[in-house]
Amino acid sequence: MIPETCPAILLRVEDLQVRRGGVTVLDIPALAIHSGQILALIGPNGTGKSTLLLALACLLKPFQGRIFFKERKIDAYRGDFNYRRHIAMVFQEPLLFDATVFDNVASGLRIRGMGRAEIERTVSGYLELFGISPLARRSARKLSGGEAQRTSLARAFVTKPEIVFLDEPFSSLDPPTREALIGDLERILRETHTTAVIATHDQTEALRLADRIAVMNEGRMVQIGPVAEVMNRPVDGFVASFVGVETVLSGRVLRISDGVFVAAVEGGEIQAVGHVRTGEGVLCCIRPEHVTLSTNTPFSESSARNVFSGTIRKITPLGLFHRVHLDCGFDLVAYVTRQSIEGLALEEGKSVFASFKATSVHVIPRKESIPM
């Protein structure tokens, strides 16, 4: 993850805008991409992630703005040939040539005028790196989706780009293929110290790969920062809901004592920690992994200040864990393991106790104060 000493800025933009039909679809006042780090752009479909990648790669002419690579301004309007030699882009669809896997991966090196022996050695190394050496002489038309995307990634990395842009590279793959490819890409990015910007609507991909996350909405970045900061301290309700804070409760502050406040929410009261004023409106955000369930009487030995009785409304399997929807007078979501489901005999309709600490509640002050 991000080291304490921030690395040099490799790419940055100022006042970048893209318009379509007279409408501004992308508006990025400033963005810095640091050398050796991975930035994930997340947000709903159609929010400008791909547009930003295309503009950064000079594949889309911006309406206005300045792009700097190693502090040298590049010509984003005409495209900058020298800049493009330092970057690579991987699309959702592999877009391979009608040629063998080897020839697809070698194409960028041939354009650069590399000799045949060096091409053979370099391409062979990257085919092995991405686990597709046995496919070297196979036609690209005969590849599975995962094999085609591995070929596309090898073609991008073989030129040793200083920055690689990846636009939803895993979205069309089946889960096992996707998981294996994400693991390999993570390893390769770290081993090669390649700077990367990846657009995805899947927060699990961002958590797996990124050092920093930028949450986008309607063509703007609403929050950018280290992964832990964005995931645990979202700036507003939109970011909270998108990064997996499945319980967002609107309330007002009733009273404050020793740094802990009590907020009234629909169906109950929440204790939390934060800098607020009595009567102030707040959003109380609770991540599901911070909620503990029990079938016993309320957690007498627990340090959790928030304990509620509730009824299980729905249990949804999600691979390694289950999502449990509770009615506690308000909607509350918890993540529990399969072992906990079995050990506690959890089922829909069963009454349980739910708890979470006051320090686990992320508080977002609302602009308006609510009358007492």
Image: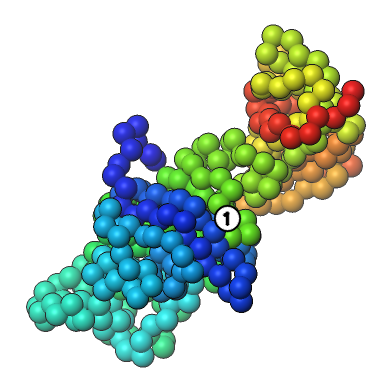
Give the image location of residue 258, x and y in percent.
Answer: 69, 9
- Tell me which residue sits at (42%, 81%) in the image: 95
Give residue 292's quadrant in the image.
Answer: top right
Q: Is residue 362 left or right of residue 211?
A: right
Asked whether residue 304 appears in the rendered view, the answer is yes
Q: Identify the image quadrant of the C terminus.
A: top right
Q: Is residue 216 left or right of residue 149?
A: right
Circle 1 — which element?
A: strand
Give residue 94's quadrant in the image.
Answer: bottom left
The residue sitting at the bottom extreme is 98
Give the image location of residue 293, x and y in percent.
Answer: 74, 31
Position of residue 62 relative to residue 331, above or below, is below
Give the image location of residue 341, x and y in percent.
Answer: 72, 40
Q: Is residue 57 left or right of residue 128?
A: right
Position of residue 96 relative to residue 271, above or below, is below
Give the residue pinned by disc 1.
220
Nearest to the observer: residue 163 or residue 281: 281
- Report the amino acid beneath label 1: Arg
- Tell me which residue sits at (32%, 89%) in the image: 99
> How many numbered marks does the figure carry?
1
Q: Identify the image quadrant of the N terminus.
A: top left
Q: Residues within 10 Å of mark 1 (few under 14, many from 20)?
A: some
Nearest to the observer: residue 218 or residue 246: 218
Nearest to the observer: residue 319 or residue 241: 241
Position of residue 94 relative to residue 50, above or below, is below
- Tell me which residue sits at (85%, 30%) in the image: 370
- Tell me which residue sits at (37%, 60%) in the image: 67
Asked whether residue 302 appears in the rendered view, the answer is no
Give the image location of residue 274, x and y in percent.
Answer: 66, 22
Position of residue 73 relative to residue 112, above or below, is above
